[in-house]
């Protein structure tokens, strides 16, 4: 290796190690800061020229994610999710029904909206509902985290890694959904069933539960507008309008309002996540340029990545090692150009998403739920999560690999 290649390798390893840990010991750097530092080092070391770094940032992915964040913000600020919360309290007459409602609601929302944003909204609502009903909140919070991951596997807009896959692979939104929705449906049933079995003490009592929903402020005109725009954006996705264009157009339309101050919407945008994406795009581009010779790519491909089961295992393992978004970016050069490339991208989307349910730190969605719970004194331990996350992950990955191994013609 020449000096530049060694520098690129060191920057790549240190950046991905920092992103995996979530911090650098002794420094106040989060994942976004680590990714941006890595990107700056790639430029400083001369691995990439500034214009190459700019081209490396996939603006379609950034735009799509930004647009969906703004749409979710308007749904939240209008009171839509509080309305759903009230509906859940009214209709959940037993612990088991409450669990089913939470799994279904979180899974469906996460299929079309960014799952991390859904968890930011659903976790506080579930904490409120379970406390007022006198229930143990932990099983229901686990349902939020796991259902958000599983439900998000269904569509390109379900989570950040799917957005990257959708933009890179150019798989039509409807085709993506048609192939992965069955995996999401079966996965949600598995989440419901396993939590029911493994947290049996919470659901053993047949006693009915009742509570009146708290009065909440609802902005009906703004809510109606947000719902209509959201439906319109989803329809545009299925009509094969470019997803980034549809999302940002819907977001811009929602910003035209007399009722919601722009500052409230902007505070709901996860800026650090967007910055992390930009930094990782540059770091990966630098590593590809300096390290991935044709011989290296061919050597990795000899690992039989074209096999659905092998790719599922590699993706799941890598996702838990460095997180799902970085894992997708790392796999990109080894998948492009293979036979049935679009099917392989579906495997990566499925495995990188479902692997997030393995541990408490397996996905950002899990961490959001755990943090929201910790703030109000509810602790979700690593072992508590793993006891359910392990079987959920293994079973859903097996279902996903089995389902996608039978798909051809993509």
Image: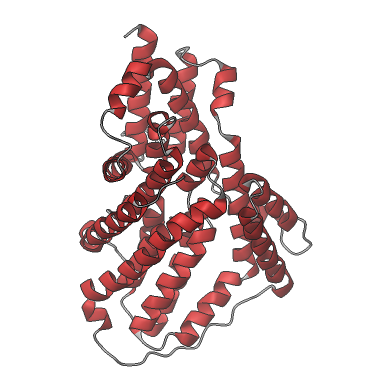
> Camera-side residue: 319 or 394?
394
Taking the spot 46% from the left edge, 19% from the top edge, the residue there is: 42
Using the rendered image of the protein, determine whether residue 161 is visible from the camera's viewpoint.
yes
Q: In which quarter of the image is residue 13?
A: top left
Q: How many labels does the image show?
A: 0
- Drawn side of residue 246 relative to residue 212, left or right: right
Which residue appears farthest toward the top when viewing the image? 2
Q: Assign the N terminus to one quadrant of the image.
A: top left
Which residue appears farthest toward the bottom when viewing the image? 207
> Camera-side residue: 374 or 31?
31
Tell me residue 80's x, y (percent). Answer: 60, 71
State whether residue 382 is above or below residue 219: above
State whether residue 205 is above or below residue 27: below
State whether residue 65 is above or below residue 84: above
> Camera-side residue: 67 or 43?
67
Taking the spot 27% from the left edge, 82% from the top edge, the residue there is: 203
């Amino acid at each position: 290796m020449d000096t530049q290649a060694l520098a690129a390798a060191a920057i790549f390893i240190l950046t991905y190690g920092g992103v995996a840990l979530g911090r650098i010991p002794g420094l106040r750097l989060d994942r976004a800061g680590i990714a941006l530092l890595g990107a700056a080092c790639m430029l400083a070391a001369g691995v990439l020229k500034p214009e190459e770094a700019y081209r490396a940032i996939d603006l379609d992915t950034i735009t799509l994610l930004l647009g969906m964040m703004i749409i979710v913000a308007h749904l939240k600020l209008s009171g839509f999710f509080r309305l759903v919360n009230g509906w859940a309290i009214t209709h959940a007459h037993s612990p088991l029904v409450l669990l089913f409602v939470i799994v279904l609601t979180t899974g469906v929302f996460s299929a079309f909206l960014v799952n991390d944003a859904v968890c930011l909204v659903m976790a506080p609502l579930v904490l409120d509902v379970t406390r007022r009903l006198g229930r143990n909140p932990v099983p229901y919070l686990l349902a939020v985290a796991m259902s958000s991951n599983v439900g998000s596997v269904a569509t390109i807009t379900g989570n950040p890694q799917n957005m990257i896959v959708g933009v890179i692979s150019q798989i039509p939104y409807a085709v993506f959904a048609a192939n992965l929705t069955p995996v999401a449906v079966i996965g949600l049933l598995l989440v419901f069933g396993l939590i029911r079995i493994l947290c049996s003490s919470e659901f053993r009592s047949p006693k009915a539960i009742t509570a009146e929903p708290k009065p909440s402020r609802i902005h009906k005109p703004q809510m109606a507008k947000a719902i209509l725009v959201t439906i319109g954006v989803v329809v545009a996705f299925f009509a094969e309008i470019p997803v980034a264009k549809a999302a940002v157009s819907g977001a811009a339309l929602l910003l035209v309002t007399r009722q919601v101050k722009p500052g409230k919407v902007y505070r709901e945008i996860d800026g650090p996540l967007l910055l992390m994406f930009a930094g990782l795009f540059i770091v990966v581009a630098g590593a590809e340029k300096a390290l991935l010779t044709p011989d290296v790519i061919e050597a990795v491909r000899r690992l039989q990545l074209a096999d659905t089961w092998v790719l599922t295992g590699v993706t799941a393992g890598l996702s838990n090692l460095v997180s799902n978004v970085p894992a997708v970016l790392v796999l990109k050069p080894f998948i492009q150009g293979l036979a049935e490339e679009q099917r392989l991208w579906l495997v990566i989307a499925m495995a990188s998403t479902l692997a997030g349910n393995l541990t408490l730190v397996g996905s950002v969605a899990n961490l959001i739920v755990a943090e929201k719970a910790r703030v109000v004194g509810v602790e979700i331990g690593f072992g508590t999560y793993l006891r359910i996350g392990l079987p959920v992950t293994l079973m859903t990955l097996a279902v996903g690999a089995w389902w996608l191994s039978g798909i051809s013609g993509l």
